[in-house]
Amino acid sequence: MSSHYPFTLLPLPYSYEALSPAIGEETLHFHHDKHMSTYVENLNKALEAHPDLQGLSLESLLKKLDRLPKDVQTAVQNNGGGVYNHQLYFSTLANPNSGTKPSEDIKKAIERDFGGIEKMFEQLKKAALGRFGSGWAYVVTDENGVLSICSTANQDVPELCSFLPLFTVDVWEHAYYLDYQNRRADYFDAFTSLINWDAVSRIYKERSSHF
Ligand code: MN3
């Protein structure tokens, strides 16, 4: 994605079949090419009349949400958040056979803060299933590298509560309905096999370099 307006839709970093059967080809086409694409378009539309905001990165826009002009605030919250969340979601998934591995640093942090990967997924699942309606559940780090679970409604982002996300599960129905209908728990269980640990470890390292 370009770093500021006009934002563009990044292609998926894998083929549309890559996550099948956990997440099917048709779901990925709709989710990426239609849903995510609409957030990008609507974010650009919202910024069209605000040349003063057009040089800002997506993270900067979201961080200064409270100080944005009223007529653009909700549009940036919903569509900017939509772009941010989907970018994170799609870029931290991979085919389960691609052999990605958690780094030693993140492995240690997961052990220390959750008691292991399975326990981390148990807590993330609780947040994902507990989110009423549409939203997201994340594994996040704080400024000291301590990991925890966070959940947001709609397209809100964890930056709004000063957490730095490492990866996320989209629990909007559009993310799983074609494959799982109402079975959000089954979608979640399949999702855990798709984590791109190389990407997540890289993000943790980037976040950690600011600590
Ligand atoms: Mn989605």
Image (cartoon, rainbow, N blue to C red):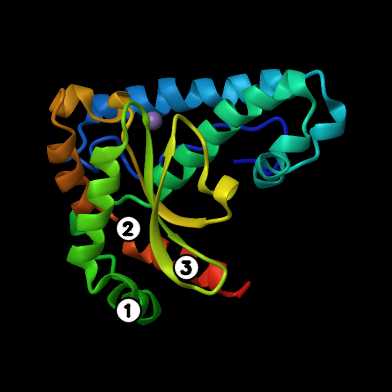
Residue under label 3, please give it. 204
Nearer the observer, 171 or 17:
171
The numbered dot on residue 112 is 1
* Residue at x 45% of width, y 29% of height: 154
Q: Quadrant of the C terminus?
A: bottom right
Picture coordinates of residue 166 (x, y %)?
44, 58
CA distance separating discs 2 and 1 = 21 Å
Please say if 168 is above or below 154: below
Query: Looking at the image, is mark 1 or mark 3 earlier in the sequence?
Result: 1
Say which amino acid is labelled 3.
Tyr
Q: Residues within 10 Å of mark 2 (few under 14, many from 20)?
A: many
Looking at the rendering, the quadrant in which ligand 1 lies is top left
Please say if 205 is above or below 40: below
CA distance separating discs 2 and 3 = 12 Å
From the image, state whether disc 2 or disc 1 is nearer to you: 1
Residue under label 2, please give it. 196
* Residue at x 28% of width, y 77% of height: 111
- Quarter of the figure with residue 15: top left
Picture coordinates of residue 163 (x, y %)?
53, 56
Dot 1: what SS?
Answer: helix
In screen coordinates, is 174 left or right of 48? Answer: left
